[in-house]
Amino acid sequence: RKEVEQDPGPFNVPEGATVAFNCTYSNSASQSFFWYRQDCRKEPKLLMSVYSSGNEDGRFTAQLNRASQYISLLIRDSKLSDSATYLCVVNALSNTGKLIFGQGTTLQVKP
Amino acid sequence: NAGVMQNPRHLVRRRGQEARLRCSPMKGHSHVYWYRQLPEEGLKFMVYLQKENIIDESGMPKERFSAEFPKEGPSILRIQQVVRGDSAAYFCASSPVSGELGEQYFGPGTRLTVT
C-alpha cells in the first residue's frame, strides 16, 4: 500500500464548477498535512496547510479526518488557471521535515 | 527576497560520468531537502540537511549518491557514475524550521538526462 494515495484523475470540469479531491495516508503517526500544486512538472508550490479543524483560503477548503486518515481539497468556482496537478503531502515525522508526496490528481478546467 | 535557486537547470551526462547539482536555499533558511521525480512518478524524498549535517538520508540510494551542505556555499547533490535510470528532475527545497512547523519552498529543479 502506498503511503499517500490519490486518484490520479484527470478531472475535467467546466469553469465555475466545484470539484473535490481526496487523499488517504497510511501512517497514523503523521503529524502535518499539506496540499501542493504542480504545473507541467515544474516545482511544486504550497497551496495550503491542512488542519484538523478544517481551513479555508478563498475558493479553496481543506479538511483532515485523522480517524479515517483522509484529507480532502474542495475548489469552488473553478478557474482556467486552476488547471494543474494537486499533490497531497504528508509530513511523516515531526522532527525530520521528510515530506511524503502522493502521485497527484490532475485537474483540467475547460471554458 | 530571492527564492530557492538551483543550477544547472538542465544537465546532460553520458553514462559513467559524474553529475553535480547545486542548491542555494532562500535567505534565512537553514534546512535543505532534496527530492527526485522520475518520469510519470511522484516526488520522492532523498535527503534532509542542515548546515554541515545530514539529518535524514533514508531516501538516498545506497551507492553513487551523496549530499552535502557546507558552512559556506550551496548544498550539493552528487551522483557518481550516472546510469540511464538516474534521468529525472531533482528538486531542492528549503525551510526556516524543520518538522511540522516547516513549510517547504521548492526550487525550479534540475533536469538530468543521462545518455
Image: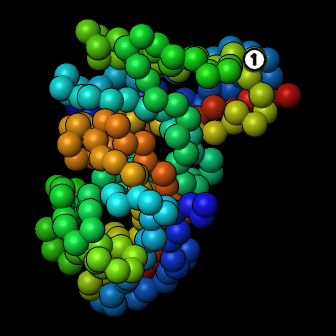
Location of the N terminus of chain A (image quadrant): top left
Q: Position of residue A33 (x, y in %)?
A: 37, 29
Q: Is residue B65 visible?
A: no
Q: Nearer the viewer, residue B9 or A2?
A: B9
Judge from the rendering whether residue B54 lies leftward or rightward of residue B70; answer left or right: left
Q: Position of residue B19 (x, y in %)?
A: 37, 83
Taking the spot 37% from the left edge, 42% from the top edge, the residue there is B102
Q: Secondary structure at mark 1?
A: loop
Subunit of label 1: A
Q: Amino acid at mark 1?
A: Asp
Residue at the extreme right: A111
Taking the spot 57% from the left edge, 17% from the top edge, the residue there is A56
Q: Nearer the viewer, residue B40 or B94?
A: B94
Taking the spot 34% from the left edge, 90% from the top edge, the residue there is B17
Q: Position of residue B38 (x, y in %)?
A: 41, 58
Q: Is residue A53 visible?
A: yes
Q: Which residue is mark 1?
A: A77
- Asked where in the image residue B70 lies, by quadrant, the reply is bottom left
